[in-house]
Image (cartoon, rainbow, N blue to C red):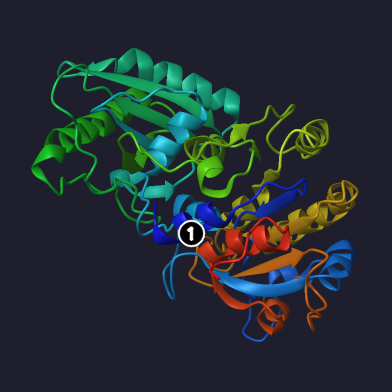
């Protein structure tokens, strides 16, 4: 463990208090025009506003100043794991999240279905967000075309919408390295990149990835929408200290997307069953209510505040924020001893991608000091009493507000 996790583990004590961490994925934004309002500030959020007036606010940098976090590092930081020390690729998170077991020497990679135009130019990195049914059809087609590459077994799994997972199996042979460059350029108007190994152990993996891309484009060339694949987030089997060992908390995850369930599972949270489509919040609320007496800590994930930002849709992101605001009273009715509302990164619609901007943080407990902030927005958060914090500060703050930490030293 890191020094911080070791210290928290030594100070942690069991109490009956309950902590609810709500992660509004990609919640931080930007105004469309300089001096205007962000998506959060534009949204009508009477319930969040009322909660803010009872809370302490601040802002969080998940990795460091000017560094744009991926979802994995952002969440690790919120959970108290230094993302510069505990590193995991998105492939493993997605694989574990859909129940795929990774063996020693295997490499998992996160894939996007994409739309390629003339000369293999990326027109859409997400292929228009196809339906889950379309995703499953494409995966079936790829499985028939790519069962192995030069004797290396290849497994292909559907995730959701444009997302899929590929696992290259070592199959008892030498371990496959995961230190290679992405195929996904994370931009449009350019060609997919060629995977390049950064060390000798990853050379075979790079060859496998490049061969997969070529064979997949051949198999999908008749589809005008889904005719290419983009890869990023290679990873082998990761290992983390358990959440229970670090904090003494019995923790539950309420999420729909496999990547977030995978990350929660890797740190030892119980992943609760959520009924209904991933966009529907009713199933998440019901899972929270059904399990409220069974756990000390709940991680409650909301995805669409991020997806709409990635789509560059300012007004739809505003709408998703307002939908959460309508849901909030149901969460508060459970009377958590500590509730935190935060993001894992910013996804401004203006940029249509993740950004480096700090995310707003709200903490309400019976032990907070008076705060001047009156809304849960980026500007108000920077006026708040919590100040600008590192992401790894959040869990100790929540533990302290829940009276779950003993005094340090004599």
Tag 1 residue? 7
Query: Residue 364, how many percent across, how many down?
Result: 78, 64
Pick the front one: 74 or 124: 74
- Please tell me whether residue 400 is drawn above or below residue 324 in the rendered image: below
Instruction: Give coordinates of residue 22: x percent, y percent.
Output: 70, 52
What is the secondary structure assignment of the residue under circle 1?
Answer: helix
Q: Quadrant of the C terminus?
A: bottom right
Residue 377 at least partly seen: no
Q: Residue furthest bottom?
A: 35
Q: Is residue 249 visible?
A: yes
- In this view of the protein, which residue sits in the foreground, 387 or 8? 8
Toward the viewer: 122 or 270?
270
Q: Residue at x 63, y 60 (%)?
A: 406
Instruction: Indicate the position of residue 115 as horizontal and vertical percent values.
Output: 43, 41
Crowd around label 1: few <14 · some 14–19 · many ≥20 (10 Å): some
Q: Does residue 32 lie above or below 21 as drawn?
A: below
**What x and y, as percent, mark residue 82?**
42, 58
């Amino acid at each position: 463990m890191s020094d911080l996790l070791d210290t928290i583990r030594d100070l942690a004590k069991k109490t009956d208090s309950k902590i609810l961490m709500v992660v509004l994925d990609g919640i931080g934004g930007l105004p469309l025009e300089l001096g205007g309002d962000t998506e959060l500030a534009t949204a009508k959020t009477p319930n969040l506003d009322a909660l803010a007036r009872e809370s302490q606010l601040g802002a969080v940098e998940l990795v460091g100043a000017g560094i744009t976090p991926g979802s994995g590092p952002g969440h690790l930081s919120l959970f108290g794991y230094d993302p510069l020390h505990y590193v995991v690729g998105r492939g493993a998170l997605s694989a574990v999240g859909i129940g795929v077991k990774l063996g020693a020497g295997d490499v998992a990679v996160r894939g996007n279905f994409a739309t390629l135009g003339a000369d293999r130019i990326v027109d859409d990195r997400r292929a228009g967000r196809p339906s889950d049914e379309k995703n499953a059809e494409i995966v079936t087609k790829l499985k028939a075309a790519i069962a192995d590459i030069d004797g290396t077994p290849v497994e292909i799994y559907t995730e959701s919408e444009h997302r899929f997972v590929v696992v290259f199996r070592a199959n008892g042979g030498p371990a496959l390295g995961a230190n290679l460059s992405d195929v996904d350029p994370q931009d449009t108007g350019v060609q997919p990149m060629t995977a390049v190994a950064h060390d000798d152990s990853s050379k075979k993996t790079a060859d496998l990835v490049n061969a997969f891309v070529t064979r997949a484009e051949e198999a999908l060339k008749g589809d005008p929408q889904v005719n290419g694949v983009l890869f990023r987030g290679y990873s082998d089997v990761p290992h983390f200290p358990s959440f229970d060992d670090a904090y003494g908390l019995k923790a539950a995850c309420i999420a729909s997307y496999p990547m977030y369930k995978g990350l929660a599972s890797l740190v030892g949270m119980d992943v609760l069953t959520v009924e209904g489509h991933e966009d529907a919040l009713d199933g998440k609320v019901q899972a929270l209510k059904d399990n409220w007496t069974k756990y000390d800590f709940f991680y409650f994930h909301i995805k669409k505040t991020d997806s709409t930002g990635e789509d560059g849709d300012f007004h739809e992101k505003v709408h998703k924020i307002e939908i959460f605001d309508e849901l909030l009273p149901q969460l508060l009715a459970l009377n958590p001893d500590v509730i935190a509302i935060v993001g894992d990164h910013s996804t401004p619609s203006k940029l249509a991608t993740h950004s480096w901007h700090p995310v707003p943080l709200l903490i309400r407990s019976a032990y907070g000091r008076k705060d001047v902030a009156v809304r849960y927005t980026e500007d108000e958060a920077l006026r708040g009493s919590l100040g600008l914090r590192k992401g790894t500060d959040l869990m100790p703050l929540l533990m302290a507000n829940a009276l779950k930490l003993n005094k340090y030293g004599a």
